[in-house]
Image: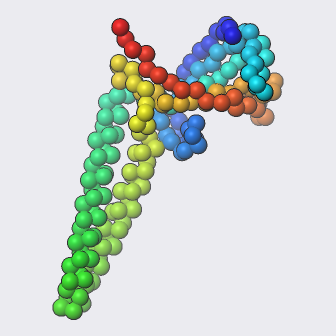
Amino acid sequence: VTFADGGWCIQRPTADILNAEGSAVKPEGLLRFWLDCSSGAKKRDVEIVPRKRIFFTTGVWDDPQGVESMEREYQLVLEQLQTIMNETRQIRNDAANNEKTDGLLNKLSEFRTLVGNSKDFDRLVSQKEALERASPPPSVSQATNGVKIAPTGSLVVKGNSIPDWLPGSEYLILGTFSTKAIEDD
């Protein structure tokens, strides 16, 4: 298989996208590149005709300091969630132990604290989930300069001859690819 030319860009997504596994993620950037397959290729029931452009897409995190900051924020959110869970558990244990001796004012105060904790808990869970979608996966490939690339990506070919800028462009999914960091000598 021979390739004639190619190109690449990094795009900044504005919303969650689906990764190669089908999970909603929001990477810092999308590494998009293409290669022109001059010879064409065929394997089983998939054929790439000669002179067909193949498009590749994967997540990229090209701001190492930003990723470190996000990881610190994530750890802080986890600690805050644990604190709320511990406090709620303590209030419930105290209430169970003092059920007959606690007055109405004390129970109202505990209820108010639990409602406040519930709101904080929901906010923190939402923040945790957003950070997880934006963070690189654990099996990410990392270059020596700290740039991280998602472990897998997708590849497609254009399925019709309609120009990209007109409605109706169709892309056919060929499959996925995996990435690996290149070791420096």
Q: How is the protein colored in the picture?
A: rainbow
In depth, the one of 132 and 137 nearer the eye is 137
Counting from the top left corner in percent of width and height, residue 160 is at 81, 27
**In which quadrant of the rendered image does the C terminus lie?**
top left
Residue with the most extreme front position: 44
Residue 126, image quadrant:
bottom left
Left or right of residue 24, residue 98 in this image: left
Q: Is residue 37 above or below residue 75?
A: above
Q: Is residue 128 above or below residue 175?
A: below
Q: Residue sitting at 30 percent across and 58 percent down?
A: 81
Q: Residue sitting at 59 percent across and 20 percent down?
A: 33
Counting from the top left corner in percent of width and height, residue 93 is at 23, 77
Counting from the top left corner in percent of width and height, residue 53 is at 70, 18
Q: Total of numbered circles in the picture?
A: 0
Q: Is residue 7 above or below residue 78?
A: above
Q: Is residue 49 above or below residue 114?
A: above
In depth, the one of 139 and 66 nearer the eye is 139
Left or right of residue 125, residue 25 in this image: right
Residue 162 visible in image = no
**In which quadrant of the rendered image does the N terminus lie?**
top right
Counting from the top left corner in percent of width and height, residue 147 is at 40, 24
Left or right of residue 41, residue 19 in this image: left
Q: Residue sitting at 39 percent across and 14 percent down?
A: 183
Residue 32 visible in image = yes
